[in-house]
Amino acid sequence: MIIVIDALNKHLFGSVLEDMFRLRGRVFGGRLGWDVTIEDGKEIDDFDNLDPAYVVGLDDNGNVVSAVRALQTTGPHMLSDVFHAILDGEAPLRSATMWESTRFCVDTQRLTRGKDRNSVSYATCELMIGSLEFARRSGIKDIVTVMDPVMDRVLKRSNNAPYGYVGKTVPMGKVPALAALLDCTEERINNVREFAGIEHDVFLTEEEALKLLIHSKSTAKMPLDTTTATTPANRDHKPLSSLEKYFVEQMRAAKTEEEVKSVLDLIEALSDSFSPEQRQTLRQTPWALANEA
């Protein structure tokens, strides 16, 4: 299941981004040994401060299992500013219809072998489909991606072979790095879908993603005393209201018991304005988040 996180909705998915940065830390700082900065287990660089788009894969329990970053090439990007050795003296690629795709990673520790929904192969192909479809819908015609030779072979095996390469392969940590070109065509997307056997829409809506995350946290952390929270939050399949989203955001930001209590007090103060069903939903939603460890 794929969600897209950008400058407009990142305040709703802070925990997802935290998990994504930790996954990047394990992959690029650990497994690949790239020269990246790791703080508190998270790999974050200057390009993450430019409000890029992140295409993130979640499993059925709301865990981050894959991710990739999309950045415009008209401004600073990794191939021009960090991996310029790959260009071997060539001018950086810059185009309004070309994006740079970097930090493609999959959680090989959480996922299994094979090709089922919980496999590395499935998550990899789902992320490829999601990133290509997101780019295509955004008017992007081509992607340039910096990767290692292993990922290059994965692309070829997945019916997603690059149509060209830029510059040369250079040493980068434990493995070399190279830059490849992919077109965002329907044919390419269909090729990956056929290889993986994925026919359905891979994207979650914002509301579906929030419900999945809230439900996952409430299921994992629900207190044994059910007098305060008898059912998982918000499982009626109705879209979250703007007010519910606000309470979710405030509860995620709460750092102390006093701050949590302030949010709950605000809900109680406003609850008389809602129907019994709405009051039930509003109370369940923050309780699910409040019981997060």
Image: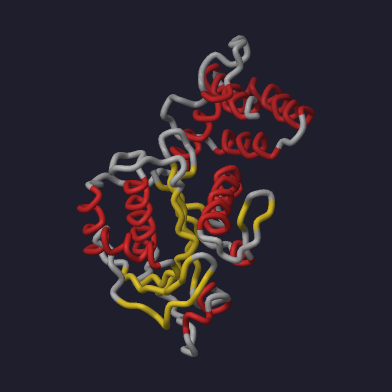
Q: Determine which quarter of the picture holds residue 173.
A: bottom right
Q: Determine which quarter of the picture holds residue 227.
A: top right
Front residue of this view, candidates 139 and 159: 159
Say which quadrant the C terminus sits in: top right
Q: Is residue 269 left or right of residue 140?
A: right
Name the residue rendered at 20%, 53% in the picture. Answer: 194
Colour scheme in use: secondary structure
**Does 36 sit above or below residue 83?**
above
**Does 158 sit above or below residue 14?**
below
Q: What is the x, y in percent for residue 269?
A: 71, 24
Q: Is residue 106 left or right of residue 242?
A: left
**Does 176 sit above or below residue 20?**
below
Say which quadrant the N terminus sits in: top left
Q: Residue furthest front?
A: 174
Residue 3 visible in the snapshot: no
Front residue of this view, candidates 95 and 191: 191
Q: What is the x, y in percent for residue 164?
A: 32, 77
Residue 166 visible in the snapshot: yes
Q: What is the x, y in percent for residue 129?
A: 32, 55
**Does 86 sit above or below residue 65?**
below
Name the residue rendered at 33%, 70% in the picture. Answer: 182
Q: Residue furthest right?
A: 258
Name the residue rendered at 46%, 53% in the picture. Answer: 67
- Number of marks: 0
Q: What is the x, y in percent for residue 291?
A: 64, 25
